[in-house]
Image: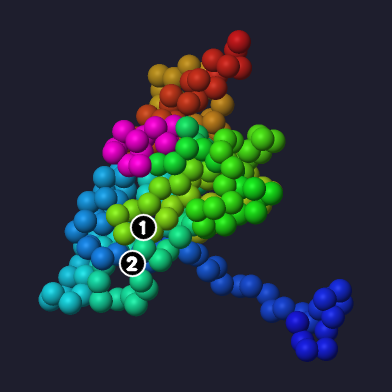
Amino acid sequence: MTSTQTANEPDTRTAPSATVDLKMEVVVIPVTDVERAKRFYEGLGWRLDGDFAYGDEWRLVQLTPPGSPCSIMIGKGFTTAVPGSVQGTFLVVDDLDGARAQLSERGIQVSEVFHFQGDLLNARSNGHTAGRDPKGRSYFSFASFNDPDGNGWLLQEVTTRFPGRGFSSVDVATMKELLREAEARHGQYERTAPKHQWPDFYAEYIVARERGKTSDEAANHAALQTERTGEQVRT
């Protein structure tokens, strides 16, 4: 907004077309003790992607949450951010109670379910009201936990996505490869499978691969879900 433009006056300037994908893939989490933080995040079940060091003054560790296209980096010598200063980083789940139970089983202190007063999302510890969103809406029920340095994470339950938010930003080359994988795996499954709709298998397989499952795990998952879908249709 220019100095002469009023709040109610539309901005008629034409923005340049976005032609390059900007994919957020890494978030830096500042920590005090790299080994302690690494143990904590691995203890959450996050995949260790790499651990690189140069002497005693520089180290970089990358980990990825299950099913996430975005990773975190912890380490020393590469950020001036204060340990514990990152707050309100979202981890989206489709089953908030299940996610809380799993974290508790791993020894993590996780909050009770809450929603924000007046729907005013914030990364602070205040402004929370106990219990699920009273309207039962997707996106509006939360739980939280901290890492050993106090960096704060929010578990957000999303069961139905806003329009335009339902698909991955996977590139064309990757999608082609996933389709080829799904085709080959479906061919193996189809030889002995009961009657079913092939898109069911493809969709389950591709989403499972996008969420970090191996080809074998994705194929087993897709077969199981396809058969369940077929049983529901028949009943």
- Give the magenta part as a residue range: 98-109
**Vertical relation: 141 (above or below) 1:** above
Whether tag 1 and tag 2 are in contact, CB under 8 A, the answer is yes
Q: What residue is drawn where x is 33% and y is 64%? A: 73
Q: Is residue 102 left or right of residue 15?
A: left
Image position of 119 with respect to 183: above or below: below
Q: Is residue 101 above or below residue 173?
A: above
Badge 1 or badge 2: first in the primary sequence: 2
Q: Residues within 10 Å of mark 2 (few under 14, many from 20)?
A: some
Residue 200: % across, % down: 54, 31
Q: CA distance from mark 1 to mark 2?
A: 8 Å
170 part of magenta stretch: no
What label does residue 59 carry, if any? none
Residue 104 percent coordinates (x, y): 34, 36
- Decide if residue 28 is in sight here: yes
Name the secondary structure under disc 1.
loop
Left or right, residue 191 beside residue 216: right
Callout 1, which amino acid? Gly
Name the residue that disc number 2 marks.
Answer: 83
- Residue 206 image point, x, y percent: 47, 42
Which label belongs to residue 150?
1
Quarter-of-image position of residue 60: bottom left
Q: Residue furthest front?
A: 126
Between 151 and 54, the one lying in front of the other is 151
> At numbered mark 2, what does the secondary structure look like: helix, strand or loop?
loop
Q: Is residue 217 left or right of residue 199?
A: left
- Amino acid type for the residue under numbered disc 2: Pro
